[in-house]
Image: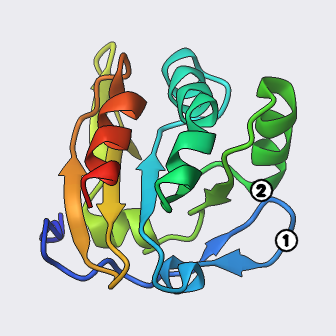
Amino acid sequence: MTDRPDAGDPFPAIALEKPEGGTTSIAEFGGKPVVLFFYPKDNTPGCTTVARDFTALAGEFASAGVALLGVSKDPPKSHQNFIRKQELVTPLASDAASDGLADALGIWVEKSMYGRTYMGMERTTYLVDGAGRIARVWRKVKVKGHAAEVLEAARAL
């Protein structure tokens, strides 16, 4: 596993695929603070709750001048379906490339379930300031109340 960037470190400017085509990265936010929430899989219970919670608070994040971006390894087509099915307004991006952003952040990790080990996304959220530096990191996120906690921190930037 790579060293994990933490508060005060620059956030890696690694490109992600957008569901509608093209790419995005931290540089695209033009000096605006951004919350990037990484989740394991589209349309699973915990991931759906987190994405819907951020969508419900999207207006408040916008009022605070903070952009939102959800990221998983799911392909862009899966994100399109997830956005449509869950009526999400929060933008999503795909980090499907090997050695992508999740790898650089050290959150693409070995997991274990029912005695089987596999690689998966560790649910992690980053609050990045307007200078592109990590202001705060939430690791191994617990879903309930998470989006509201992140909003509170974002308002304090």
What numbered label is drawn on residue 21?
1
Mark 2, residue position: 76
* Residue visible at 50% across and 28% down in the picture: 50
Pinpoint residue 132: horizontal percent, then vertical percent. 34, 81
What numbered label is drawn on residue 134?
none
Pinpoint residue 72: horizontal percent, then vertical percent. 55, 49
* Residue visible at 55% across and 52% down in the picture: 63
Q: Quadrant of residue 146?
A: top left
Q: Secondary structure at mark 1?
A: loop
Pinpoint residue 17: horizontal percent, then vertical percent. 69, 70
Of residue 81 and residue 74, the one placed in the foreground of this image is 81
Circles 1 and 2: CB distance less than 8 Å? Answer: yes
Of residue 116 and residue 134, the one placed in the foreground of this image is 134
* Residue visible at 64% across and 59% down in the picture: 93
Q: Which colouring convention does the figure follow?
A: rainbow
Residue 22 sits above or below residue 73 on the image:
below
Pinpoint residue 57: horizontal percent, then vertical percent. 55, 34
Judge left or right: residue 53 versus residue 151. Answer: right
Residue 22 sits above or below residue 134 on the image:
below
Q: Quadrant of residue 29?
A: bottom right
Note whether residue 14 is visible. yes
* Sooner in the amino-acid sequence: mark 1 or mark 2: 1
Judge left or right: residue 27 versus residue 133. Answer: right
Q: Secondary structure at mark 2?
A: helix
* Residue visible at 87% across and 63% down in the picture: 20
Of residue 11 and residue 58, the one placed in the foreground of this image is 58
Note whether residue 122 is visible. no
Of residue 31 and residue 52, the one placed in the foreground of this image is 31
Identity of the residue furthest to the front in this view: 63
